[in-house]
Image (cartoon, helix red, strand yellow):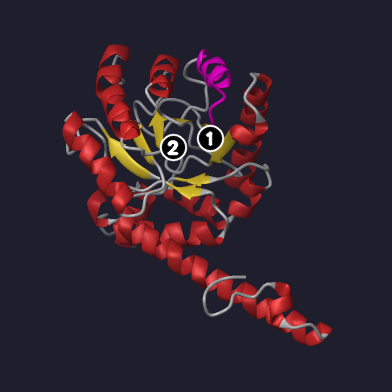
């Protein structure tokens, strides 16, 4: 999932893609680099960001969604407003990515349910105006899993089909670096919720903290893409459905390598089973030299 921020104030690339034509071109470039879908957002969710009004968010987002969809791009819309989601879906968006999981706008779930669209439910504890809101945990993995489960149940009760739900642990939202790292270390617990998993770690603060080391100054957001690619590979290995990133090529390469290693491991395991059971590897579907099973 490639990111197109149509904002002047996003934490990593605010203002770079604020013009509609430039934003559409950037989205097409992300697809050329390997993005399977493009996430378009018109409101920054960085800590302390001031919300834009509805009319301005619509002005930023809808032309970009329409432009990318007209080029055949699979588009998700990153919004907490039902009106923006509704118009984006009508303009060709295929998925709604709501960082509040439907909590910020009570009309969101009915809109998504009526459209029968996929819906990303992120772990969210409130707007981040004024800093890291409610970022205290005794057991961050257990609490995030429990709170996401409760939110998914509410979304299901609101009429969104279970096969349309994607979950997101909300890295960086009301979480410190140690919380984000713990969640990445236990993605299997999030898989237990039974829905596809989106991991959105790209350029976030916790990566800056890791790269800086004890007492060091975190590198700027745009210097965290190699670290993002590392997280993407780990998330892919752990079975994530998608990773949301600003710089696609490095992550696409990292995910391809992770997948190749996983396939090699699976083929090795099949070969071992074949030797112990007396069957041939081909009988178990090992890939041949041409890549066919």
Q: Quadrant of the C terminus?
A: bottom right
* Residue 71, horizontal then vertical, whole percent: 31, 37
Number of the label disc, if any, that sits on residue 221: none
Residue 132 is one of the magenta-drawn residues: no
Q: Nearer the viewer, residue 201 or 146?
A: 201
Start and end of the magenta stretch?
106-118
- Going from N to C along the chain, the mark reached first, 2 or 1, is 1
Tell whether 279 sits left or right of 198: right
The structure residue drawn at horizontal position 43% and vertical position 50%, both measured from the top left corner, is 177
Q: CA distance from mark 2 to mark 1?
A: 8 Å
Label 2 CA crowd tier, 10 Å (few <14, some 14–19, many 20+): many
Tell whether 12 sits left or right of 194: left
* Residue 64, horizontal then vertical, whole percent: 27, 29
Q: Quadrant of the N terminus?
A: top left
* Residue 249, horizontal then vertical, whole percent: 31, 58
Asked if residue 48 can be seen in this view, the reply is no
Magenta region's main secondary structure?
A: helix
Residue 113 is one of the magenta-drawn residues: yes
* Residue 190, horizontal then vertical, whole percent: 62, 46
* Disc 2: which residue: 173
The structure residue drawn at horizontal position 59% and vertical position 39%, both measured from the top left corner, is 144
Number of the label disc, if any, that sits on residue 123: 1
Asked if the residue at tag 1 contacts the one at tag 2, i.e. Cβ–Cβ closer than 8 Å, the answer is: yes
Residue 164, compared with residue 209, is above or below; it is: above
Label 1 CA crowd tier, 10 Å (few <14, some 14–19, many 20+): many
The structure residue drawn at horizontal position 28% and vertical position 41%, both measured from the top left corner, is 27
Asked if residue 152 can be seen in this view, the reply is yes
Residue 11, compared with residue 203, is above or below; it is: above
Tell whether 67 sits left or right of 88: left
């Amino acid at each position: 999932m490639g990111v197109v921020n149509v904002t002047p104030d996003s934490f990593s690339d605010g203002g770079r893609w604020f013009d509609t034509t430039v934003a559409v071109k950037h989205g097409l470039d992300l697809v050329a680099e390997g993005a399977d879908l493009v996430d378009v957002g018109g409101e920054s969710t960085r800590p302390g960001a001031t919300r834009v009004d509805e009319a301005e968010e619509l002005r930023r987002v809808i032309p970009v969604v329409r432009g990318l969809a007209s080029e055949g791009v699979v588009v998700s819309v990153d919004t907490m407003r039902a009106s923006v989601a509704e118009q984006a879906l009508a303009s060709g968006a295929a998925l709604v990515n709501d960082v509040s999981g439907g909590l910020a706008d009570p009309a969101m779930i009915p809109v998504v349910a009526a459209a029968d669209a996929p819906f990303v439910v992120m772990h969210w504890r409130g707007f981040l105006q004024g800093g890291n809101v409610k970022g205290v945990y005794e057991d961050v993995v257990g609490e995030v899993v429990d709170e996401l489960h409760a939110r998914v149940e509410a979304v299901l009760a609101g009429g969104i089909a279970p096969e349309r739900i994607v979950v997101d642990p909300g890295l960086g939202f009301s979480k410190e670096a140690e919380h984000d790292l713990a969640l990445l270390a236990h993605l299997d617990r999030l898989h237990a919720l039974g829905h596809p998993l989106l991991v959105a770690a790209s350029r976030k603060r916790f990566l800056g903290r890791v790269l800086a080391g004890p007492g060091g100054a975190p590198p700027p957001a745009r210097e965290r893409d190699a670290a993002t690619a590392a997280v993407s590979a780990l998330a892919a290995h752990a079975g994530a459905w998608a990773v949301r990133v600003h710089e696609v090529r490095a992550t696409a390469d990292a995910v391809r390598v992770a997948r190749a290693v996983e396939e090699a491991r699976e083929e090795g395991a099949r070969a071992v089973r074949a030797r112990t059971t007396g069957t041939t590897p081909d009988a178990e579907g090992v890939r041949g030299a041409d890549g066919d099973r």
